[in-house]
Image (spheres, grey):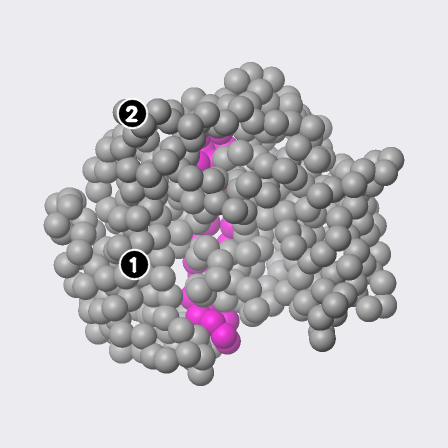
């Protein structure tokens, strides 16, 4: 729980550091986080968190960051969200997706359009992959009016643990966000996906596709999964493979699932057939959960609703993830906003539990945006 003293919000523990720093940068509130892994054998900030702090420093101007000698206390006073062109080497403990998710929060509200060149692991088993964010988060951003110049491109693929991938994310600045009314997800009309492989046999991609289709063909005919086999300089430093799937509805909702092979030297080998079938089942589970926003983008939708114009926004989503529940608590701490949460009546329910999230935006205006 946040404790506010003056304009500084205080927390204990290492959890949700990325969330807290991102919301601090948007709200202008300073944060002090103490007791970071203070009881563990390896206390203090981990390397990937230090890398994230460096990224936050690059996209802002005038930030004040203080870390004590043991790394167990962090004070962050955010500066102006500057944007422009930045380059960042992401720590291989976490994929580029970990860093990119925070940039999705921040990029529309910067002074200049952001062009971020991120290097590291593009696909792992922890964070959303670049492939999935491209086909789910970007269409969601467009719903809020963030459109022209919005792009996410994989230049080089890099599997865990070696990485070696490169991604370019471009985002325009936005003075205001549109309110949204997303209450009907629609029916699934098609499934798309990419089976990627790097530094392994090109046949693996085909094996993944065939096994995934063996499950999905029972439910819908319009399925296209393409293979992306990279080799040489564009294949990163480690071998691996995986699958990213997305189901699109008649109303423009995108529901996703993904799986990646075990990193080289970690765990037992994964068969492409097992990975394809399991990923297809995960997608069907996500479809069952339903909603107008998939699980990994719940927090992005709720943040944009919070920062929208002083008008009512509504979105129907599936069961709230634990991360989303904590995100709602943080939105209250930083922006003093609370959502109205209504469960869908049983007789109207299709699939899993659904909730209707409603709020009135705080009327956040991007005062940093350069006037042309």
Residue 90 image position (x, y, % from top left): 59, 64
**Which residue has dot 1 on it?**
279
Q: Is residue 87 left or right of residue 153?
A: right
Q: Is residue 72 above or below residue 190?
A: below
The magenta span reads 140-169
Residue located 22% across and 69% down the image: 273
**Label 1 environment density (alpha carbons within 10 Å; few <14, some 14–19, many ≥20):** many
Q: Is residue 220 left or right of residue 278?
A: left
* Label 2 secondary element: helix
Q: Is residue 141 above or below residue 18?
A: above
Which image quarter: residue 7? top right
**Which residue has dot 2 on it?**
348
Q: Is residue 355 left or right of residue 307?
A: left
Which image quarter: residue 176? top right
Which image quarter: residue 113? top right
Q: Is residue 30 above or below residue 35?
A: above
Nearer to the camera, 124 or 139: 124
Res 59 seen here: yes
Q: Disc 1 vs disc 2: which is toward the camera? A: 2
**Label 2 environment density (alpha carbons within 10 Å; few <14, some 14–19, many ≥20):** few
Residue located 26% across and 56% down the image: 280
Nearer to the camera, 60 or 233: 60
Q: CA distance from mark 1 to mark 2?
A: 28 Å
Res 369 seen here: no
Residue 164 image position (x, y, % from top left): 50, 71
On whether residue 162 falls in the magenta region, the answer is yes
Q: Is residue 32 left or right of residue 98?
A: right
């Amino acid at each position: 729980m946040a404790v506010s003293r003056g304009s500084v919000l205080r927390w204990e523990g290492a959890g949700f550091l990325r969330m807290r720093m991102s919301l601090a940068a948007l709200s202008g509130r300073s944060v002090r986080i103490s007791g970071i892994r203070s009881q563990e054998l390896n206390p203090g900030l981990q390397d990937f968190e230090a890398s994230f702090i460096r990224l936050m420093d690059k996209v802002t101007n005038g930030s004040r960051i203080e870390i004590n000698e043991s790394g167990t206390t962090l004070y962050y006073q955010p500066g102006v969200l500057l944007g422009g062109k930045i380059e960042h080497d992401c720590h291989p403990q976490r994929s580029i997706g970990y860093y990119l998710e925070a940039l999705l929060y921040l990029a529309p509200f910067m002074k200049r359009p952001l062009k971020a060149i991120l290097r590291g692991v593009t696909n792992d088993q922890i964070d959303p992959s670049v492939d999935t964010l491209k086909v789910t988060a970007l269409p969601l951003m467009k719903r809020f009016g963030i459109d022209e110049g919005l792009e996410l491109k994989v230049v080089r693929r890099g599997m865990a643990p070696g990485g070696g991938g490169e991604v370019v994310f471009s985002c325009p600045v936005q003075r205001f966000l549109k309110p949204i009314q997303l209450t009907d997800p629609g029916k699934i009309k098609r499934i798309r996906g990419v089976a990627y492989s790097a530094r392994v046999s090109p046949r693996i991609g085909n094996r993944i596709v065939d096994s995934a289709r063996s499950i999905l063909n029972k439910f819908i005919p319009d399925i296209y999964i393409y293979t992306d086999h990279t080799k040489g300089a564009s294949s990163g430093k480690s071998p691996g493979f995986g699958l990213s799937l997305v189901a699109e509805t008649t109303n423009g909702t995108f529901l996703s699932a993904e799986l990646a092979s075990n990193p080289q030297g970690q765990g037992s080998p994964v068969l492409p057939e097992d990975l394809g079938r399991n990923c297809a089942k995960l997608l069907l589970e996500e479809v069952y959960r339903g909603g107008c926003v998939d699980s990994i983008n719940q927090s992005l939708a709720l943040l944009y609703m919070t920062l929208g114009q002083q008008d009512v926004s509504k979105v129907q989503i599936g069961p709230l993830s634990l991360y989303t529940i904590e995100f709602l608590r943080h939105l209250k701490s930083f922006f003093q906003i609370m959502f109205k949460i209504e469960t869908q009546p049983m007789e109207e329910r299709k699939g899993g539990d659904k909730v209707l999230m409603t709020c009135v935006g705080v009327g956040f205006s991007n005062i940093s945006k350069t006037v042309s």
